Image (cartoon, rainbow, N blue to C red):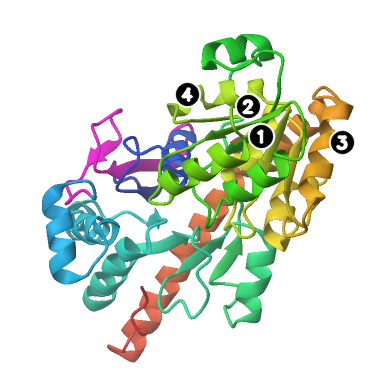
Amino acid sequence: MAATSEKLRVAVVCPGAARIPRGYETFAAELYRTLSDRSDVDVVLLADSKRTSRGHQRVPSLRREWRVTRLIGRATRLHAHTIEHLTFGLTSLLWLATTRPDVIIVSERPVAAVYRRVRDFLRGRWAIVVSNGSSWMPPYGSIDVVQQLTEPFYADALAAGASASQTRLVPLGFELSNSAQPVDPQEARQQLGLDEGAHIVLTVGSLDRSVKRIDWIAREVATLPDVELLAVGAHHPETEDLLAELGRLLPGRFHTMTVPPDQVHLAYAAADVFVLASQRESFGRVIIEALDSGVPTIVHNSPSIAWVAGPEATVIDMSAEGALAEAIARAITSGRSSGSERRRRSARERFDWASLVDDYVAMFVAAREGRTAARGRQSANGPQNAGSPQQ
């Protein structure tokens, strides 16, 4: 990272970026690419993955999937993800000490905790921004800025005592304007091996009951003739039991699959309706992906999910028996093409990176200025306890 006084120096930090196809990792990679196009920002991506560009710096860690990490986890009673994040945070400190970025943005709180503790002890210069994908509530200690992803979570943070200078509302950005051209639904079904004549309800996410509530979707779909369920996502400890239940509820009428990230658009193209049955999400990337594809989108009426979905989605009470089946039937009757352009426009106007990148840069500038002011106060007042540890 070049040390130029004219540019804002930003480190986008994510252990699994360019390696793990998950929300945090996708966000970090897209933010890095977006900032790379700015003439006023000097950006680097820190990740434990094979370098994909000049500004991508590889930082080693004890990866979550390694056997040694799991063994350490059993001995220490720490989750493998936490061990990966802590070791990544520690090994990346040398890079931070030698390059001295103005701002670090990170989603993983254990990594942020390492940076905060070391910075506060050494009275370092870098500002820390935590992108709050885990619905973390105050107090935030000496973290400079906590990025809230939705208006309801922002309001909750303020009500819980966060200051307006320490928390900011900046939604997740998406590479929507560069999305693949729409795929013909029948062609998409052929590629995925789906029945070309069936009505297909799609859900995307972890194949589980506890969060994504795929069993609930299946029970509602089971009441609708000639409707099939397509669940796309990664396996979960609950998946085996879930598949057995789907077999009982929807014999011959369900499909589950895991597809590469660059093929998920085929699932959206193949669907007549998209459903996210989660009753709580910190954001819900799949909602925006669905809207951007034009497919009718049905979500739960929690404040944050409804805020993300916006006016072009159907918002219902997912705990009310029969409500989802009724909404699916209405969407199928109306047809996919009804309102598809409005859904795409809503997603792109609110969440495309082109609409949000200036807000991100403003957040980073505010974090840098706040850190500079805090260091000035520390110099004037002498060493002080910078804040209670936050995980």
Left or right: residue 298 versus residue 258 is: right
Q: Which of marks 4 and 3 is in front?
A: 3
Say which of 298 and 284 sits in front: 298
Determine the CA span between mark 4 and mark 3.
Answer: 30 Å
Around disc 4, counting alpha carbons within 10 Å, would you say few (fewer than 14), some (14 to 19), or many (20 or more)? few
Around disc 1, counting alpha carbons within 10 Å, would you say few (fewer than 14), some (14 to 19), or many (20 or more)? many
Q: Residue 119 appears at what percent x and percent y?
A: 27, 70
Residue labelled with disc 1: 290
Please state the extent of the stretch shown in magenta in the rendering: 35-63
- Check residue 268 in the rendering and tell me which mark sits there, or answer none: 2
Q: Do the residues labelled 2 and 1 touch (CB within 8 Å)?
A: yes
Left or right: residue 175 versus residue 30 is: right
Dot 4 or dot 1, earlier in sequence = 4
Say which of 330 and 378 sits in front: 330
Q: Does the magenta stretch include residue 117?
A: no
What residue type is disc 4 on? Answer: Asp
Residue labelled with disc 3: 330
| Rendered residue at 27%/74% (across/down) | 117
Around disc 2, counting alpha carbons within 10 Å, would you say few (fewer than 14), some (14 to 19), or many (20 or more)? many
| Rendered residue at 71%/20% (across/down) | 198
Residue 369 visible in the snapshot: yes
Q: Is residue 58 magenta?
A: yes
What residue type is disc 3 on? Answer: Arg
Residue labelled with disc 4: 262
In which quarter of the view is residue 292 placed? top right
Dot 4 or dot 2, earlier in sequence = 4
Image quadrant in which the N terminus is located: top left
In which quarter of the view is residue 28 placed? top left
Which secondary structure lies at badge 2? Answer: helix
Residue 351 visible in the snapshot: no
